[in-house]
Amino acid sequence: MTKKKIFINLILLMSLLISATFFYGFLSATNVIKNKGEKVAKNVEKSNNKEDKKELKNTIILGLGDSLTKGIGDEKGEGYFQKTINKLKVDNPKIKGINFAVSGAKTNDLLTTINQNGVVSAIKEANIIVITIGGNDLFPGWDRLSPDMVKNSTFNSKDFNNRMDTIFTSIHKINPNTKIYWLTLYNPFEEFEVLGNTNEYVQLWNFEAEKLSNKYKYVNVIPIFDLFKGKTVSMLYSDNFHPNSIGYEVISERVVQNLSVEINELNGVKNGK
């Protein structure tokens, strides 16, 4: 073999060795990147799983007020309050509902209720308080309701506002961290034209209620007037005053929409996700 051929063979061999070394290095680098990528992906997945499995907090929702929170008229015996608790428990089994509502209660009755020992203890523990009150103050009873009473309504009296002020401030004093959700009124009498413009009667009351609640950062109003407008025939119980199961179902859906935001904040979950 001539020196020229030996030289050429040496060059070819060196080229092959260099190529093999480069290719091995490339494969090694690729595997390192792949392994690091898989590790990062697993870490991200673990992080997401931790976020998804974030331990939920015990959340106590307290119901106060009158027959609407009590659930009178619901053929299923639940009312909007229990329906709300059942819906919320689907995503958070640590939610607990306590109901101290009293059928027929007026604002002066609620003032008495919130000073009872057992109720005071419940208020101290409650994260959220849901209230329906005022309907029995506004409507004295079907047998006593008249066109003149509707026309000359004094529902926004100083006494009523003072009692509501005392209710809100008393609850806040017992538990400064709880949030209050006050359901305003629907109109059960819109089909009875003989009574006059009852829609206006109820809407004026709702307006005053919302204005009153705006004084307190911890009080939120949940309107339900629109849910029943034009639909009372299918959404009221046989007494033509309380909601039936359908009516309570619709109310509970509105309440869940409002409380879900608060519950997410309590659990450190960003809303809108």
Image (tube, helix red, strand yellow):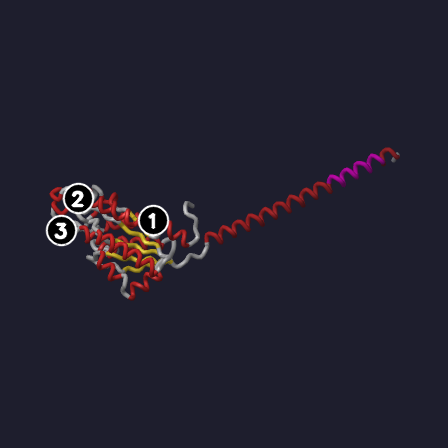
* Residue that carries the numbered disc 3 in the rendered image: 142
Residue 249 seen in the figure: no
The front one of 249 and 62 is 62
Toward which corner of the image does residue 122 lie, by quadrant?
bottom left
**Residue lying at the far bottom of the rendered structure:** 117
The x, y position of residue 3, in whole percent, is: 88, 35
Please name whichever residue, 148 or 241, is drawn nearer the observer in this view of the structure. 148
Query: How many numbered dots are placed on residues in this image?
Result: 3
Separation of marks 3 and 1 at Cα, in angstroms: 31 Å
From the top left corner, tell me how far across and down residue 160 is, in percent.
Answer: 22, 53
Magenta stretch encompasses residue 75: no
- Residue 175 coordinates in the image, percent (x, y): 35, 60
Residue drawn at the location 21% of the way across and 49% of the way down: 156
Highlighted range, magenta: 7-19
Density class for disc 3 (Cα within 10 Å; few <14, some 14-19, many ≥20) is few
Give the amino acid type for the residue marked by disc 2 in the picture: Thr
The residue to which callout 2 is attached is 198
Helix, strand or loop under label 1: helix
